[in-house]
């Protein structure tokens, strides 16, 4: 029996690169029909990445830059269509009484517009078919093709841009080496490469996974290989580059912890797992394609992050954030926890670390309260990072601490090279901890955290509701240049202040909400049991089902 249905769209919204549609389906059928987007030009259908039902009402959304097999939507008009199997039942229309102001390429309401120059853009806008009244989402897109390497260029062009072409020679050669070893590799599932372009040696999430595998005796089943660099621009020898390329081509599992350009240029065998143990927790600052329209946003034809096959995250909320930022499918994200957060549930480790931190910061043991001030850097990257120290009155803060017999540990972001100038009179009440690498260790002796836009808030939130304060003196400027996944006010679990005097006043009054902290943990952590490392090993490396 044929199914009759009507789709009414009740609202439309675009958030960065996500198209949201709300509506209702009117039908006599017991089961709601399938709803997909149909491309009039190619006659192909694309399923939305999400659809949530509440009775006959739905909310669907899709990332327009990744819904097409992790690539942008092709050009054309996309109609929202109900299907009974392969049979097309009806096109969506706007609900009676809902008449949005329709767009064209010159208007911005509901639009998704990404312009990176001629021949490199994505423009999408909603409209209404003048003949049928059906809703459609119109896409115009132009994406540059693959780079043409030096061997296809004239000698004069090669000679005039020698430095760039030397890079192209190296790039071309490394791909040839990779393809050679990939062709002859024997994939047996037991060769694991741990690597990083931002750490000189294994540490962080990778170290947790590696050490736990050793504890479980998995070194009998796996062969481990390592390649670590202090930074992505560190100079390495030709022999080491060759060895690294060979390792990438012959490893069964590649584990990394950060952005690493040398990983992204290769096409891996489908049997290879590329596991990204991202260094930051939660869904805070915008990244990658969430920065569309702001400095640092990637090009539409980027290969960056596209090779990942598995990525553990702390929650489903975080999975949505990273899937949008990296423009890869949400099925690659696993809300099973971040390995390095396991220490916050290990009582023996906590006790040991408290003792070590009191040895490192002996004055903290006698203080009535210990604060940690850990702001993030300003600037675009490690090369131009800075912090506006004039926004912090260390004389006034020192007096505050001395009067209350309290102690302040200051931990600037590692990118900030300028040292904190502590007034001589207050050196017994505050200390610059720049030389101590692992800030998470310090957290165990901290009573109160003060930060601005640092993801340290996620780790600190696991310490039984200890208060946090947010000294965001440049919030509007930061939002204009970097921005957040959600609004700053929706994200942070503590009081926001813009003036330094207001910060000291809030600290004195202990002005914070424990309920707000509890809600933050519930939203951002699926598990709070200290077993994230084992879940990463079991589900992502060993391939066991949850």
Image (cartoon, rainbow, N blue to C red):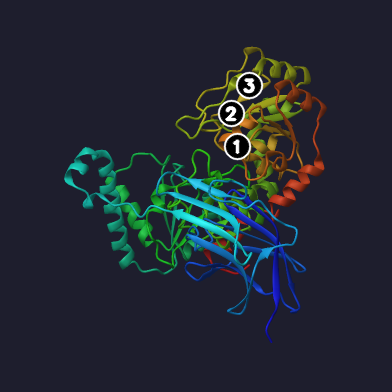
| Tag nearer the camera, 1 or 3 | 3
Q: Are marks 3 and 2 in contact (CB under 8 Å)?
A: no
Earlier-in-chain disc, 1 versus 3: 3
Q: Quadrant of residue 450?
A: top right
Question: In the displayed structure, does residue 283 sit left or right of residue 142?
Answer: right
Q: Which residue is mark 1?
A: 439
Numbered label attached to residue 433: 2
- Relative to 534, residue 357 above or below: above
Q: Residue furthest left?
A: 155
Q: Nearer the viewer, residue 344 or 173?
A: 173
**Cα gap from disc 1 to disc 3, whole angstroms:** 22 Å
Q: Residue furthest front?
A: 131
Numbered label attached to residue 297: none
Earlier-in-chain disc, 2 versus 1: 2
Q: Which residue is mark 3?
A: 391
Point out the image quarter for the N terminus. Answer: bottom right
Helix, strand or loop status at disc 1: helix
Question: In the displayed structure, does residue 227 sit left or right of residue 500?
Answer: left
Earlier-in-chain disc, 3 versus 2: 3
**Cα gap from disc 3 to disc 2, whole angstroms:** 19 Å
What is the crowding at mark 3: few (fewer than 14 residues within 10 Å), some, or many (at least 20)? few
């Amino acid at each position: 029996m044929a199914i009759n249905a009507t789709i009414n769209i009740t609202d439309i919204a675009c958030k960065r690169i996500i198209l949201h549609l709300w509506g209702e389906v009117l039908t006599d059928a017991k089961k709601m029909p399938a709803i997909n987007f149909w491309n009039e030009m190619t006659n192909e259908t694309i399923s939305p990445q999400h659809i949530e039902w509440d009775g006959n009402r739905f909310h669907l959304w899709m990332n327009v830059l990744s819904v097409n097999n992790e690539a942008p939507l092709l050009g054309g008009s996309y109609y929202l269509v109900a299907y009974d199997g392969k049979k097309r039942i009806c096109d969506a229309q706007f609900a009676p009484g809902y008449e949005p102001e329709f767009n064209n390429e010159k208007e911005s309401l509901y639009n998704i517009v990404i312009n990176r120059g001629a021949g490199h853009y994505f423009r999408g806008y909603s409209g209404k078919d003048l003949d049928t009244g059906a809703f459609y989402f119109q896409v115009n897109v132009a994406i540059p093709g693959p780079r043409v390497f030096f061997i296809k260029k004239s000698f004069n062009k090669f000679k005039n841009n020698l430095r760039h072409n030397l890079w192209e020679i190296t790039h071309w050669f490394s791909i040839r080496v990779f393809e050679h070893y990939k062709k002859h590799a024997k994939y047996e599932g037991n060769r694991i490469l741990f690597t990083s372009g931002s750490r000189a040696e294994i540490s962080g999430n990778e170290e947790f996974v590696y050490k736990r595998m050793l504890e479980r005796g998995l070194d009998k089943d796996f062969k481990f290989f390592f390649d670590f660099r202090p930074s992505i621009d560190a100079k390495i020898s030709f022999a080491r580059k060759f060895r690294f390329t060979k390792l990438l081509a012959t490893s069964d599992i590649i584990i990394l912890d950060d952005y690493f350009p040398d990983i992204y240029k290769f096409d891996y065998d489908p049997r290879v797992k590329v596991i990204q143990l991202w260094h930051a927790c939660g869904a805070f600052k915008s990244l990658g394609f969430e920065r569309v329209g702001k400095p640092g946003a990637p090009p539409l034809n980027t290969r960056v992050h596209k090779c990942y096959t598995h990525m553990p995250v702390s929650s489903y909320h975080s999975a949505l954030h990273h899937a949008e930022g990296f423009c890869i499918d949400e099925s690659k994200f696993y809300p099973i926890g971040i390995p390095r957060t396991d220490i916050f549930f290990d009582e023996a480790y906590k006790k040991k670390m408290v003792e070590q931190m009191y040895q490192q910061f002996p004055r903290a043991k006698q203080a009535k309260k210990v604060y940690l001030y850990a702001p993030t850097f300003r600037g675009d990257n490690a090369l131009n990072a800075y912090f506006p120290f004039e926004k912090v009155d260390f004389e006034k803060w020192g007096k505050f601490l001395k009067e209350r017999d309290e102690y302040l540990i200051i931990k600037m972001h590692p990118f900030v090279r300028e040292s904190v100038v502590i007034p001589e009179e207050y050196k017994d009440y505050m200390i610059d901890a720049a030389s101590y690498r692992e800030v998470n260790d310090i957290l165990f002796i901290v009573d109160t955290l003060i930060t601005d836009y640092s993801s340290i808030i996620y780790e600190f939130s696991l310490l039984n509701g200890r208060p946090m304060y947010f000294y965001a003196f440049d919030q509007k400027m930061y939002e204009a240049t970097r921005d957040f996944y959600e609004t700053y006010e929706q994200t942070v679990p503590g009081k926001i202040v813009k003036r330094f005097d207001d910060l000291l006043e809030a600290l004195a009054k202990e002005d914070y909400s424990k309920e707000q902290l509890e809600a933050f943990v519930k939203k951002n952590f699926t598990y709070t049991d200290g077993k994230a490392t084992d879940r990463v090993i079991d589900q992502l490396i060993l391939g066991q089902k949850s």
